[in-house]
Image (tube, rainbow, N blue to C red):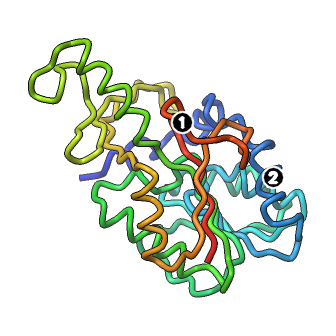
Amino acid sequence: MKQWYEQLFENYARKYDDESFTQGTLGECDFIEQEVNHDKSVEILDVGCGTGRHSIELTKRGYSVTGIDLSRSQIDRAREKSQGLDIDFSVADARNLEFDSEFDLVIMLCEGGFPLMETDQMNYQILLNASKALKSRGKLIFTTLNGLFPLFHSVKEFINAGAEKGRSAENTFDLMTFRDHSEYETEDDTGNRLLVECNERYYVPPEIDWLLKSVGFTSVDIYGATLGQFSRSDTLTTEDYEMLVIAER
């Protein structure tokens, strides 16, 4: 049986490019360039590249980028959009990568694989593989779901509802697993109704710090992630739905 993220991205590439959460590409690439000091010699791996929006923009700016995604539909669209550009797009599973010390920078943006997996062990494997793919002193930049957001807002709901068992009937966030189970409804590329049962893992900053240091990173910085406006001056708060993580080996 296909997982929810496989179902979602099976026939959703063109619709994906029109979603509101994919419209921050230029500003996000501006930030990436700052993080590599505009050094065009860096080799970049884009994990969960989707339809290639970051890979394509960075290549246009003079960088060498490899893009991987689990969805063949997304990769086919990325190849279609990138005609005339030298980008290596391929279908690959971030849990089973074989890259070894090949890249200066790994990016995983807009939940590019992590933290969509159905187990914590799978999410961990993605971080481990990202670390292995990096050269010495390499850097990882990714966004992930901020556990402080549902925790803070769920607690408020618990108090207001007078819940006695630590969970309201309307709340889909599981405090024991930090997973949110929800339905996502959209249309696929052929106009058919698409309804998937999502299962996403939220992480709190200390977890991310520990996970990254356990797979070889020595420096971990965490910020709020504002669409199209990534910044090291954006302090993470309980109102940030996503967090921006920058880790260095």
Split into 4 quadrants, where in the image is the C terminus? bottom right
Q: CA distance from mark 2 to mark 1?
A: 29 Å
Residue 202 figure quarter: top left
Of 226 and 153, which appears nearest the observer?
Answer: 153
Residue 104 to residue 122: above or below: below
How many residues crowd around disc 2 within 10 Å: few (fewer than 14), some, or many (20 or more)? some
Q: Amino acid at mark 2?
A: Glu
Q: x, y percentage for residue 203?
A: 40, 50
Residue 14 visible (yes or no): yes
Element on which disc 1 rests: loop
Nearest the eye: 47 or 215: 215
Q: Is residue 40 above or below residue 206?
A: below
User: Which residue is drawn at the image coordinates 55% and 57% (left, top)?
Assistant: 48
Total marks placed: 2
Relative side of 60 to 11, left or right: right
Q: Position of residue 78 (x, y in %)?
A: 67, 53
Q: Which residue is mark 1?
A: 237
Can residue 75 be seen here?
A: no
Image quadrant of residue 120? bottom left
Which disc, if any, is residue 221? none
Residue hosting label 2 = 57
| Relative horizontal placement of residue 169, taking residue 67 as reference (left or right) | left
Q: Could you tell me which residue is drawn at 52 percent across and 57 percent down?
A: 72
Name the residue at 47% across, 63% down: 209
Name of the residue lying farthest toward the left: 165
Q: Amino acid at mark 1?
A: Thr
